[in-house]
Amino acid sequence: MTKSEIAKFIDHTNLNPCATKADIKKLCDEAKEHSFASVCVNPSFVSFAYEELKNSPVKVCTVIGFPLGADTLDNKAASAAVAVDEGADEIDMVVNLALVKEGEWDELTEEIRAVVDAANSVDVVTERKVENAIIKVILETCFLSDNEIVQACRCAEKAGADFVKTSTGFAIVKDSDDRLLPNGATVHAVSLMRQTVGNKMQVKASGGIRTFEDAAAMIDAGATRIGTSSGCAIVGS
């Protein structure tokens, strides 16, 4: 795979809480220049990104329940509906990790389905109507066992989501000596997710992917989308 070919896998991302409109305009311009799959921005920038990208094939992606996943089901669903109404094509939602840790799989499925339904049932008032918003389910795999990853993937599939995604990139994981540990995508997690969902869903690798080699390894493991703030570096500019 060449660097230009890998561009179509990339969700070009800026979720910095201090990002400005100038930063997001730059993000959108870069995405158009390199033909990235989407830009991923915080919800407050969805309408701005939509206006910047509406004459291009680049999609607008935003995050819901980010980065902790600890919001209520109703708030997540409402936020997804608003985001689609303002121009989002794709929603990356963080699951409620307490439900995963407690093994509350029916409740987790219900939460994901609520976001899927909300994002696909609103009346979009923008010029380009979104009939089938793409829903990506962020599992935050650095906190999960292999079994929890598998079960959460099955819930996402049952709920009608389109993708499972590894990470927010914002998790804080420490060892017993209080040293920070890796918090992003791993080849192991991506491979496990792909094995679990087969061809029924897509897999997004996100968090800590900064080089062409990193991205290629995730794609080889089964990822069909790469979330990264290093898109331009990956494609070589």
Image (cartoon, grey):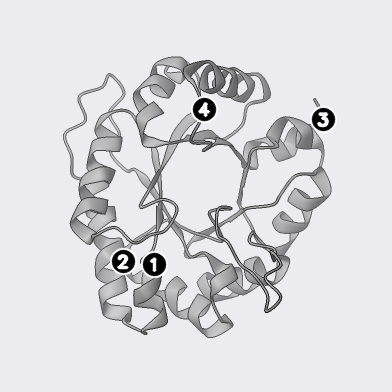
Give the vertical position of 196 relative to 32 (above or below): below
Tell me the residue at 51%/70% (across/down).
197
Q: Is residue 7 left or right of residue 144?
A: right
- Secondary structure of the residue carrying tag 2 is helix
Distance Cα–Cα, label 1 vs label 2: 5 Å
Q: Which residue is the site of mark 1?
A: 156
Which residue reaches farthest front? 177
Residue 97 % position (x, y): 40, 70
Q: Of circles 4 and 3, which is in front?
A: 4
Q: Amino acid at mark 2?
A: Ala
Quadrant of res 166: bottom right
Tell me the residue at 52%/85% (across/down).
147
Residue 70 % position (x, y): 34, 61
- The answer to which of marks 3 and 2 sits earlier in the sequence is 2
Residue 10 % position (x, y): 63, 40
Give the vertical position of 47 relative to 181 (above or below): above
Residue 74 % position (x, y): 18, 56
Q: Which mark is residue 19?
A: 4
Q: Is label 3 in contact with label 2 (beta carbons under 8 Å)?
A: no
- The answer to which of marks 4 and 3 sits earlier in the sequence is 4
Q: Which residue is the site of mark 2?
A: 159
Q: Amino acid at mark 3?
A: Gly
Disc 2 crowd rating (10 Å Cα; few below 14, some 14-19, many 20+) is many
Disc 4 crowd rating (10 Å Cα; few below 14, some 14-19, many 20+) is few
Q: Which residue is the site of mark 3?
A: 236
Distance Cα–Cα, label 3 vs label 2: 38 Å
Q: Is label 1 in contact with label 2 (beta carbons under 8 Å)?
A: yes
Q: Amino acid at mark 1?
A: Ala
